[in-house]
Amino acid sequence: MSTTLEPPIAPGIVREIESESKESLDPGYMVICWDDPVNLMDYVTHVFQQVFAWKKEKAQFHMLEVHHKGKSVLTRETMERAEFYVHELQKYQLRATMEPGE
Amino acid sequence: MNLLEAKNGLFIFRLERRERDVLTLVLKQFPVGGGPTMPLSKSGDEKRLIEHAKLLEEALAEQRKEHKQQLDAFLGEQGRFAEDGHNHFRVRLTSTQMDWLLRVLNEVRVGLWTKLGQPETGDWLALEGQFDDVVTMERCALFQTQLLAALSEE
């Protein structure tokens, strides 16, 4: 005799909870670009487009944030990915660092 | 330096002889200085940061070496600047070469800025005895602006 039992929790919901708890345990690293008086604004936009494959609008938004606020958090990543991005940004001579997530 | 055509990732510029000479002169200054623009991080385990900073320095040194080799090949290539009428030349650049040229010009510019003590924008012209470096920085900025404008045209 076979019976069909309804699972106690839907699989989709379980995955969502696991993902949320992993996120809260690992805040990751923020990749930050800092303002400087030497790099051209359009050049900074170009670099963001190249490094992150962003559309121009998004790249410009972050460039302006760097310009007006002194810094912009570009992305939040694992340590290895964050380090990769900082290397790439510094290869373009931008002032970039990675800082532990808050 | 005028953009003649930007299509399918290929850019064609027309330069006056003087512009070609200035561009060549500026590019021949590469590399200027070197090293990271900032430490990898402003916080964290100091020992680990030193280790990572070393990796960053090595990556930048390797890139500088590659750029220098590419630059020598670029400037030494027969017909790189093809004659186009009296006192004018044409240069063809791919998207990849455009990005590379922007990087090289920027490295010269930032390198000179670092050499000058990283002054704020308004202070540049007041620097005594450093006028040549300031002019070279401005020339780099001019070429960069033209390349960036061309990229946005495509």
Image: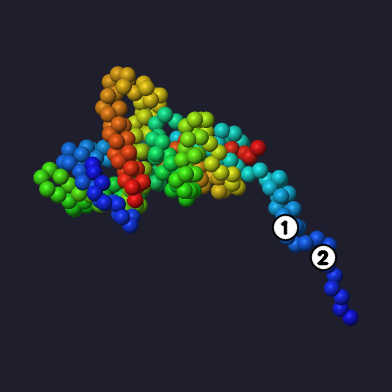
Above or below residue B124? Residue A84 is below
Q: Residues within 10 Å of mark 1 (few under 14, many from 20)?
A: few
The front one of B56 and B82 is B82
The front one of B132 and B33 is B132
Spot occupied by residue A58 in the image (x, y as percentages of width and height): 49, 44
Residue depicted at x 29% and y 23%: B130
Above or below residue B105? Residue B98 is below
Above or below residue B137? Residue B7 is below
Residue B76 visible in rendering: no
Q: Which residue is mark 2?
A: A7
Secondary element type, mark 2: loop
Q: Is residue A93 left or right of residue A17?
A: left
Residue depicted at x 37% and y 22%: B122
Residue depicted at x 33% and y 57%: B8
Given the image, what chain letter belongs to the residue carrying mark 2? A
Inspect the image, locate mark 1, and give the three-letter code of the amino acid beneath it. Arg
> In this rendering, which labeled residue sits more in front, label 2 or label 1?
2
Secondary element type, mark 1: helix
Q: Residue furthest bottom?
A: A1
Q: Quadrant of residue B45?
A: top right
Inspect the image, locate mark 2, and give the three-letter code of the amino acid beneath it. Pro
Q: Earlier in the sequence, mark 2 or mark 1?
A: 2
Q: In the drawing, what numbered circle is on residue B113?
A: none
Mark 2 vs mark 1, CA separation in Å: 14 Å
Q: Quadrant of residue B51?
A: top right
Q: Which residue is mark 1?
A: A15
Residue depicted at x 63% and y 44%: A28
Spot occupied by residue B88 in the image (x, y as percentages of width and height): 15, 45
Residue A30 visible in rendering: yes
